[in-house]
Image (cartoon, rainbow, N blue to C red):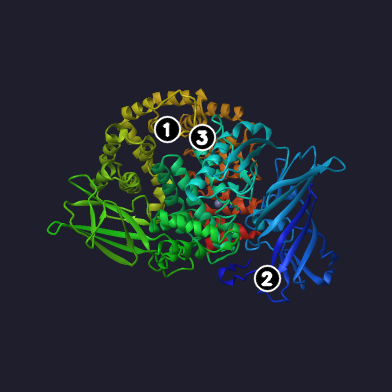
Amino acid sequence: PQPVYLSDYQPPAYRVTHTELTFDLDPAATRVKARLLIERNDQADGKAPLVLEGEHLTLISLAIDGTPLTESEYRLDDHGLEIHAVPASFSLESEVEIAPSANTALEGLYQSSGMYCTQCEAEGFRRITFYPDRPDVMATFTVTVIGDAQREPVLLANGNPVERGELENGRHFVKWDDPHPKPCYLFALVAGNLHKVEDTFTTMSGRNVTLQIWVEKENLDKTEHAMASLKRSMTWDEQTYGREYDLDLFMIVAVNDFNMGAMENKGLNIFNSAAVLTHPDTATDAAFQNVEGIVAHEYFHNWSGNRVTCRDWFQLSLKEGFTVFRDQCFSADTNSAPVKRIEDVSFFRTAQFAEDAGPTAHPVRPDHYIEITNFYTLTIYEKGAEVVRMLCNLVGWDAFRRGADTYFERFDGQAVTIEDFVNCMAEASGEDLGQFMRWYSQAGTPEIDAYGEYDYAHSEYHLTLRQRTPATPGQTQKQPLHIPVRMGLVGTKSGQDLTLTLAGEKLGKDAVVHLRDDEQTFVFTDVAEAPVPSLLRDFSAPVKMHFPYSREDLAFLLTHDSDGFNRWDAGQRLAMLALDDLIAAHRNGVEKVMDTRVTDAFKTLLTGAGASADKAVLAEMLTLPSEAYIAEQQPIVDVDAIHAAREFVRQSLAFALRDEFMAVFEANRSDEPYAPTPEQIAKRSLKNVALGYLMAIEDDQAIAFCQEQVAAKHNMTDVRHALTLLVHSDRDDLSGPALKAFGEKWAHDPLVMDQWFTIQVTRPQPDVLERVEFLMQHPAFSLRNPNKVRALVGAFAQNRVNFHRLDGKGYALLADVVIELNRLNPEIAARLVTPLTRWQRFDEARQALMRHQLERIKQEPLSSNVYEVVAKALA
Ligand code: B3K
Ligand code: ZN
């Protein structure tokens, strides 16, 4: 397979002004008729051929302005159709046949639990009809869907329904019209036996919009939270960005088989059922929050993505980075803002940093790709969002909002580039964002080495920041970035933020310094007492900040930093120092000794000043860095030493602070009826963190609480947490029956069975690999369902001690599944292989084992998706 390059971009020679589609649905032989109104673009050569993409299509007929084409007039291959000569303006009529029931890739038109649905982003529309499948071709669409009146009573597509009727042989049709020009990746169709929940929303200009969520009948009681989230999102986008919804109807459909979380098709969002359905009995707090965030994300795309879209797929972060930033802000406004930031950053620093440090590292705007589906990554989404957040902080909210207004107004109905977006921000603020653009083109995680010195004699604090970005594949030379470092100086005597005076200018107690050069020294004057610097507050840039903090400094910041995020981060850093020592001790076979400063800090959090803090933040502060995060900090990952060190800390804390944990647990139990409110979520998470520590020492009373919590069936958050703690303990005598009962009770609910799989394959006990093999034969498991693959095989690959077994069987199992999935669903296969691509981070024995499996995969006839990832990993 050959790469596509950004530098090769050419505007299309032809545009489609209107697209008319008719679907005659059949599982094995759906007929798709297309009538495209096409015009040659002014700049294009009059002899330019018409290029249409098309894959897995059987061509039935092809005509221009009603005249059938002969075979000499076009060229057809596996990738599409080229018509040699066409008029400047014409209509192209085609008919093709496709087989939705045979479509296991879940791109294009496919069947999921008997219903028809589509996924067209990025390049799935070419599996539906011959078309210029590129986002810079935008057309209005009229779509007629014909189906069986019994099997498919509901027939949906984008826009508004304009006509419906009965046909012969028990068939019926609905015709839909979408007046907003859109690229074909936003096309959607759904047909099946679906049921709806309906509501209305009145927009800021007073228009009434009908809101519908379509689900299978048994899920009608699981839509309330998604509907409430949708309404909150619509209000938020009006209030925050002045953006109003633009059709009379907004639909969400839940489907069981879906490669990603959801898709923002115009007026007809299609969701993975896991990203829309919730019920207190079946979904955890985390799932409720995830649903809220994804509903918001897809809704926000209506402006950031649909009304203004991407010129080409290299610009993907234009819509994704911006929209993730928007949904993060929405969730922060709706829930606990500091906790949202802590969650997002801890995920980012674990997963995106790992991507940036591995063989598939790429810039926020890549300059080439083989398979675009492989680029729906943490870098495009989450790092892209961090870049937009930096922009917002650099220019300030008011200018950012003006820039966004300009962007939406100027480019409405157009397909544009990242420059277009950033230029709006530069224009609105007057800032020079030239150097800032490097964030989009340079891959890798910048690291800042910081040094500080307090000059008593002159009451000055000298802060030196030095930046470097490690080489990434294909990019060895890195240039300095424009990095906004938000910071404060916390006085060691007063415990207060000191006023920052830089070059004679008073900046307040919290300010942003701009690092632009390789190295810069900032001299703060009138610093009355020796400070500890609080750097990169609120994670003001997606970088690694190194500062030689002592443990005393960190314990001080943990209680005194005015920035909630950095208070949490100080705790994480303090724990990391202790963990580093313990990892070394484990490796050297030396007795492990607990750092009492960590215990003291935890005691303060549990009993002292900390106990009055926001409970959700407190729960985060009491959570140790994950094994995956710890691994990211090590030069060579030693999975066993990391696991042992972290367990040692958990157990030491539990022994030392048993009564304190017990008191926190007791104080935060509650009998109130479940609601996914921030207050309740905070209490549950604090209570469950405490229970987790107590279970680390298998405390008898804690075991009893777990059993009680599993049996109470009060809500899935508590049930799942307690069941997980039991299953991850050594008390198989108790967890065995509990797991069995849970599995039987929820056998009918696929989303709960996903959780049942995950709980079992993430436990640290050494029997897990055999359990994965066994569970893959379970009737509830299917390789064709991406949620099941993620819940069982994907979750196992995150089980650090068991996936990385020294006999290599974990790697072999993953490779076997990748090889099989490569044939069924290349997109999922390519994602699943990721853990193997990180082989460079491990010891030599594991490196060899992982590489061996990658080589084995590479021997197979591969999809371009898996090929691209594996080839990079072995390069
Ligand atoms: N835009 C979709 C991406 C789906 C692409 C899958 N190949 C999801 C989202 O970001 O909202
Ligand atoms: Zn998105």
Q: Earlier in the sequence, mark 2 or mark 3?
A: 2
Foreground mark, 1 or 2, reads 2
The image position of residue 159, as x and y in percent, is 68, 49
Q: Earlier in the sequence, mark 1 or mark 2?
A: 2
Write the residue at 84% across / 64% down: 66
Write the residue at 77% across / 72% down: 87
Badge number at residue 691 = none
The image position of residue 604, as x and y in percent, is 27, 35
- Binning the other alpha carbons within 10 Å of mark 1 as few (below 14), some (14 to 19) or many (20 upward) gives some
Res. 613 image quadrant: top left
Badge number at residue 41 = 2
Q: Could you give the CA–CA distance between mark 2 and mark 3, rounded to whole angstroms?
A: 52 Å
Which quarter of the image is occupied by the N terminus? Answer: bottom right
* Residue that extends furthest to the left in the rendered view of this protein: 457
Q: Amino acid at mark 3?
A: Thr
Dot 3: what SS?
A: loop
Residue that carries the numbered disc 1 in the rendered image: 679
Q: Amino acid at mark 2?
A: Asn
Answer above or below: position of 418 versus 530.
below
Foreground mark, 3 or 1, reads 1
Residue that carries the numbered disc 3 in the rendered image: 284
Write the residue at 34% across / 30% down: 661
* Residue that extends furthest to the right in the rendered view of this protein: 168
The image position of residue 666, as x and y in percent, is 37, 25
Q: Could you give the CA–CA distance between mark 3 and mark 1, rounded to whole angstroms?
A: 15 Å
